[in-house]
Amino acid sequence: MPKPLSSLATWGLAAAAAGALLVGCSSEEAKLPKDKVANTVAEKLAAQTGQPKPDVTCPKDLVGKVGTTLRCKLTASDGSSLGVTVKVTSVDGDDIKYDIKADG
């Protein structure tokens, strides 16, 4: 297999097992800014894989409603990329918990 696929497999396995807890901004509807979600996903994946922090981008803020999903894009240091789904699992006030799952 080419090197980019092994890198994608590593990120995919890490993303499948990842989860995060963040604190959103105070508002009537809890939301996490897209840049904050992307940064936390990247940091968590880097810590789990021991690889350099990937570039993760998300198209919009994450709304704090259970079941809400957000599709982000991960680009590894070798240029390979894959999709990442962020899914809200629980919300307690402004605390939003979500799971991360990379495309297979």
Image (cartoon, grey):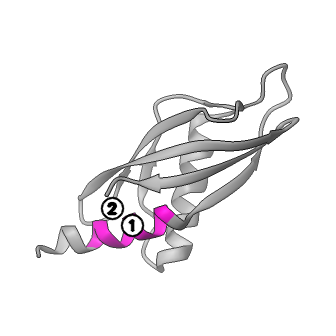
Image marks 2 and 1: residues in contact by CB distance under 8 Å: yes
Percent of width and height locating residue 6: 24, 74
Could you tell me which secondary element the residue under label 2 belongs to? Answer: loop
Q: Which residue occupies 62% across, 35% down? A: 67
In terms of sequence position, does the residue under pointer 2 or pointer 1 come before the other? 1
Depth-wise, is mark 2 or mark 1 nearer the camera? Answer: 1
Q: Quadrant of the N terminus?
A: bottom left
Identity of the amino acid at label 2?
Ala
Residue 90, by quadrant, is top right
Q: Which residue occupies 53% across, 47% down? A: 38
Q: Which residue is mark 2?
A: 76
Q: Which residue occupies 78% across, 22% down? A: 29
Could you tell me which secondary element the residue under label 1 belongs to? Answer: helix
Q: Which of the numbered marks, if any, corresponds to residue 91?
A: none
Q: Which residue occupies 88% across, 35% down? A: 93
Percent of width and height locating residue 68: 60, 32
Percent of width and height locating residue 4: 20, 68
Say whether residue 84 is left or right of residue 36. left
Q: Which residue is mark 1?
A: 11
**Magenta segment, which residues?**
7-16
Residue 31, by quadrant, is top right
Identity of the amino acid at label 1?
Trp
Percent of width and height locating residue 65: 70, 30
Distance (Cα) linking label 2 and label 1: 8 Å
Say whether residue 4 is left or right of residue 58. left
Whether residue 26 appears in magenta in the rendering, the answer is no
